[in-house]
Image: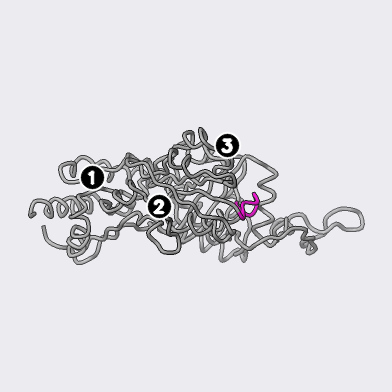
Amino acid sequence: MKIRDITLPALKPIGGKEEIDALKSVIESGWWGKGPKVEQFENEFAKMVGHKYAVALTSNTHGLDLVLKAKGIKDCNFISPTMSFMTTGIVPIWNNCTSTLCDVDRRTLNIDPEDVKKHLKKDTKAVLAVNMAGVPADIDGIRGHFDGLIIEDCAHSCYTPGAGTKGDIAIWSFQAVKTLPCGDGGMITTDNKEFYEQLKAMTWLGIRESTYDRTRSGRAGPDGKPLPGYSWDYVVDTVGYKAYMIDIMAAICLEQMKKLDKHLEIRRHIQKRYNEELAEFITAPEWSETVQYYCARVPKEDRDDLIDYLATKKIHTSVHFKPLHLHPVLKQDRDFPVADDEWLHLISLPVHPGMTDEDTDYVIYWVKEYFKQK
């Protein structure tokens, strides 16, 4: 097969005229900050994932930080999986927590409830479970050992049916290559109204009503009726931060929501083809409804060579993830027998909604060629 001129990326967002028109509408409206599009996105997203309330944010990372601050999770032990992105290990440190990493289940690469049990301490206040590559974590298993706060990280599982409903709080991501991307952004969903109101204020320096909210309510006149304009006054009685989503990003998210089912269908189609046509050469990952990543396993002695070989064929791949405990900033004084072994086998093959069957054929052909030539 002829080598292409254009590189096939491992991950890629796909947008079009709909997103451009949505952005044009927001720009022309003059309302670029947090306004009607953010409100609409929060409402529609909460409904999609089966929660009463949603708070749209700048990122999943800020979402985790706000949850810890809102719940008073500080100066304590915080547990999360070592197979994850840096967010889950670093944010607890921002809050002066001991960031305790746990080993993972060999098949799903999700946090292992039995390893959680081993590392629970008297001051453990929260456990974070990541739905790795969109595969649901065993939160019921964690609850068998821990009755404290469980945060469900749904960054990879938008939308896996039932995602976000097992933990006490769910956090989502709309980063550039996620299944519902807008460049960057996040969401916290909950059924607790009091917590929702607390989070809303925390996203904007403790101000409980956004400028858009106060534009709609207006300032009361002498007769008690709202005057034209907006109510400029507000009272801040709590410490807050600055982490709210703006309409420019929400407009993209709303258009991506309309395409989500189709994009997931494409991802699952690619997953099915890889599973079936590469079965002789790779170990397929656990089935994922979102296929945020296709984390194939190959012999560890072949992994890096295969990455380099595919790069020469203009195919980009990745590894999800290098275990967090291997980074000096999160070094742990113990062994991680599963993660230390499994990550050396991992290679993430290209999977995104911009791929055609011809693209998938191309990846399958060159993976086979690598192993046939050995």
Crowding at mark 3 (Cα within 10 Å: few <14, some 14-19, many 20+): few
Q: Quadrant location of the N terminus?
A: bottom left
Q: Which of marks 3 and 1 is nearer the N terminus?
A: 3
Q: Quadrant of residue 201?
A: bottom right
Q: Name the residue under label 3.
A: 147
Q: Which of marks 2 and 1 is nearer the N terminus?
A: 1
Q: Is residue 45 visible?
A: no
Part of the protein shown in magenta: 68-75
Q: Is residue 21 magenta?
A: no
User: Which quadrant of the figure contains the C terminus?
Assistant: bottom left
Residue corresponding to mark 1:
274
Neighbor class of circle 2 (other Cα within 10 Å; few <14, some 14-19, many 20+) is few
Q: At x 46% / y 34%, what residue is drawn? A: 141
Give, as a three-letter code, the residue at label 2: Arg
Circle 3 SS class: loop
| Camera-side residue of 240 and 146 | 146
Viewer-nearest of discs 3 and 1? 3
Is residue 132 left or right of 52 when viewed as pictured?
Answer: left
Residue sitting at x 36%, y 41%: 105
